[in-house]
Image (cartoon, rainbow, N blue to C red):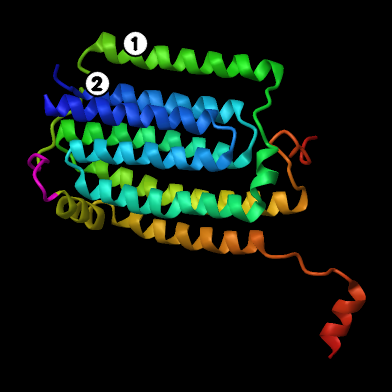
Amino acid sequence: MEITTGWYLVLGALLFVIGGTGLLIRRNPLVMLMCVELMLNGVNLSFVAFSRTLGDIGGQTVVFFVLVVAAAEVVVGLGLVVAILRRQPGSTADDLSALKG
Amino acid sequence: MVDTLVFVVAAVICLVGALGVVLARNPVHSALMLVMTLFGIAVQFVAQEAHFLAAVQVIVYAGAIVVLFLFVIMLLGVDRAQNLEMSFLPVQKWAALLFASGSLAVVVALIVVVGEPVTGVQAMGGTLGGTDDARLLARSLFSDYVYAFELTSLLLVIAVIGAVVLVRKPKQTNPVAAEDGGGS
């Protein structure tokens, strides 16, 4: 059995869906951020698969930018989590409804 | 044959790690499972001749981001974080299941039905493959994508400043004390 591009795309889609489901069902803000990382990795895998199939380095360049944005996102997200949990220890995503109208 | 074996083993590692991230009750276990998934992805990158990205994946993700996660978990206290177990809103569980099955069915059906999912035009600048992907990536990054590259530096500066501002201890907002501090 030969591994074609479609297999990599299916694996990327599986990772994306698992991450998205975790984002919906978990209430711990830290685990939700990890699930976002899972989704980004699924997309990265698809980008690299397309890049290899088409012989275009642009896909790998986009993956590079996704890595940078993911790092920035985690830094700001964890800063928010630390700031919130310092004020309200043990709160989940459902408790953070202070801005609700 | 070896390609198939590498793909299957790395895919199993990825999927087990991903399910572990979602299902583990302890956030520390979730972070360690995330490392497992990231290593699996790095193996897939190597299998597709993206050696530089595989190295960056291990260094940035496993070396920096997951360590940051573990650092925050330890900062907030493990026992406090363990209280945040899975708890479902009644509707949310079914909405999540619907999202998962629906989107997965659509994507897989598209890939399987279309058969040949890649319909783009082959690049003119020669083929990838071999071991000079770092050189090609650097040339692309500093020529075609140079403005985006400069903007990421701005993004990183903003992220650092934002993180510092967010986690700074709030100052005592006692007006008398502030007035004294200003006067002396």
- Are the numbered discs 1 and 2 placed on the same chain, yes or no? no
**For the point 46% across and 25% down, which residue is it?**
A18
Residue that label 1 marks: B109
For label 1, the SS is helix
Percent of width and height locating residue B60? 37, 53
Which residue: 89% across, 71% down?
B174
B50 lies left or right of A22: left
Q: Tell me the number on the disc at residue B142.
A: none
Instruction: Please report the bounds of the magenta region as a residue range.
Output: B125-132
Q: Residue furthest top?
A: B113
**In this picture, is B151 found above or below B114?**
below
Spatial CA span between label 1 and label 2: 11 Å
Q: Dot 1: within a 10 Å radius of its alpha carbon, few (fewer than 14), some, or many (20 or more) residues? A: few
Q: Is residue B101 above or below residue B36?
A: above
Residue located beneath label 2 in the image: A6
- Residue drawn at (14%, 20%) of the image: A2
Q: Is residue B131 magenta?
A: yes
Is residue A23 found left or right of A93 in the rendered image? left
Figure quadrant of the C terminus of chain B: bottom right
Q: Chain of mark 2?
A: A
- Using the rendered view, name the quadrant where residue A51 is placed: top left
Is residue B146 shown above or below B7?
below
- Inspect the magenta stretch and tell me whether residue B172 lies in it: no
Q: Nearer the viewer, residue B157 or A15?
A: A15
* Residue A22: percent from left, percent from top: 54, 28
Q: Amino acid at mark 2?
A: Gly
Task: Name the magenta segment's main secondary structure.
Answer: loop
Residue B10 image position (x, y, % from top left): 28, 31
Q: Label 1 is placed on what type of residue?
A: Ala
The quadrant holding residue B181 is bottom right
Q: Nearer the viewer, residue A15 or B74?
A: B74
